[in-house]
Amino acid sequence: MKEQIENYIDKNLSGEMKRTALAFVDYLKKNGLTFYRDTCDCWKEKIYYWVKFGEECVCFIAIKDPDEPENFWTVWSDECAAYESETVGDDVKVVGWSHVDFCGNCGSCGGGREKVIFGRRFPGVCGCTFRIDNAVETDLPFLKEMADLRIKELMNNNVIEHYDRLIDENNDPVRDSQPLREYMDKWDGQEFIDEMELDKAKSVLEVGVGTGRLAVRVAPLCGKFCGIDISPKTVEKAKENLAVYKNATLVCGDFLNFRFDRSFDVIYSSLTFMHIKDKRGAVNKIARLLNYGGRFILSLDKNKSEFIDTDTSRIKIYPDDPDTLEEYIKAAGLTALRRYETEHAFIIVSAKH
Ligand SMILES: C[S@@+](CC[C@H](N)C(=O)[O-])C[C@H]1O[C@@H](n2cnc3c(N)ncnc32)[C@H](O)[C@@H]1O
């Protein structure tokens, strides 16, 4: 039987290091990552794993490398733009900075380069960014965060590719036929828009605006409209569709990371939360962005499948449970006003008092 990484850890590590390595591997496996043992010439005598999300690498793990007798186990990160971000906790930053992988002139990255890591600039950093030798329990929160940031980046890339491709394939719900538009209304529709209680004094944000299916109905009824979407091609299409509404701004970015310079009277989202893994984080951010007296109208797809499949792509999604979302909404300090169902969605209406 093929040896698993846990067996190698069991045989070669002990005490706190063994517990940490097993806990990290368990965490990675629970996040759907796969372990690929590298048997190329350079590594075949060693225990060296590529830890992958789909076809992409999240990190690399070596156990008891005979060339480094002082190291029992080592983790290297892969390249990840999110390691630049300052938004991680201070504890994680400090541990991360202590594990920056400076160039050891191995020849693979041409001498290292300057990188911003958790908001601080470092010279001569290896392609990998982080190298953690002999990690113990205090390193575990950092290791998990390092993996999470990379997984999130890869998941976002998948979502971006999926929705960019739909635009390339000429999908634009704003241009759908009347029967198709009526079908899409089964996730939201006029009642959903009425719940926003719009007037010309109100500022509105749509999370996951798409090409503007709902936005073209909302923008003419409000003061200022802002739509955010993670897919650049989708945002370009939304800009075309909303060009006549001078009060509309469309921005491209991940809602969870984007820094808004203003707050809103109404925030709504439809057919988007299934893409968001950190639903509590998204709800908390929405609550922070809402003005007092503001309303949050959320449509949750009833579909429970964990993937969206099209002829050309398959992406992982995170189905929603309305009870859990209502809990997050209340915990974020919003008041749940109403919950109702359409044919394909649960709608939760809440307000900030
Ligand atoms: C199924 S479409 C729905 C679009 C629109 N709300 C509608 O109902 O027609 C989901 C949209 O959410 C966007 N999206 C997914 N994750 C996002 C994120 N983290 N931040 C911003 N937009 C996101 C996608 O790019 C996509 O355009």
Image: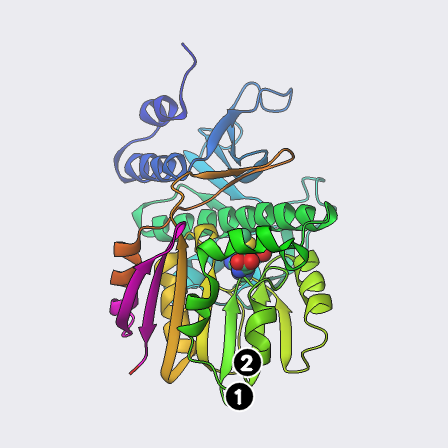
User: Which secondary structure, mark 1?
Assistant: loop
Q: Which residue is mark 1?
A: 200
From this view, report whether residue 72 is shown above or below residue 145.
above
Name the residue carrying label 2: 221
Residue 31 horizontal/vertical position (percent): 40, 40
**The C terminus - image quarter:** bottom left
90 or 58: nearer the eye? 58
Disc 2 crowd rating (10 Å Cα; few below 14, some 14-19, many 20+) is: some
User: Is-magenta flag for residue 351?
Assistant: yes
Q: Residue 117 is drawn in which quadrant? A: bottom right
Task: Provide the residue span drawn in magenta.
Answer: 329-352
Query: Can residue 143 be seen by looking at this rendering?
Result: yes
Q: Nearer the viewer, residue 154 or 106?
A: 154
Q: Residue at x 53, y 88 (%)?
A: 200
Residue that sits furthest to the front in the current view: 179
Quarter of the figure that contains the N terminus: top left
| Horizontal and vertical percent position of residue 235 | 66, 63
Q: Residue at x 61, y 64 (%)?
A: 212
Is 72 rendered above or below residue 193? above
Could you tell me if the residues under marks 2 and 1 are in contact, i.e. CB atoms within 8 Å?
Answer: yes
Return the residue nearer the eye: 86 or 328.
Answer: 328
> What percent of the width, then of the height, locates residue 206?
52, 69
Ligand 1 sits in which quadrant?
bottom right
Which residue is farthest top? Answer: 1
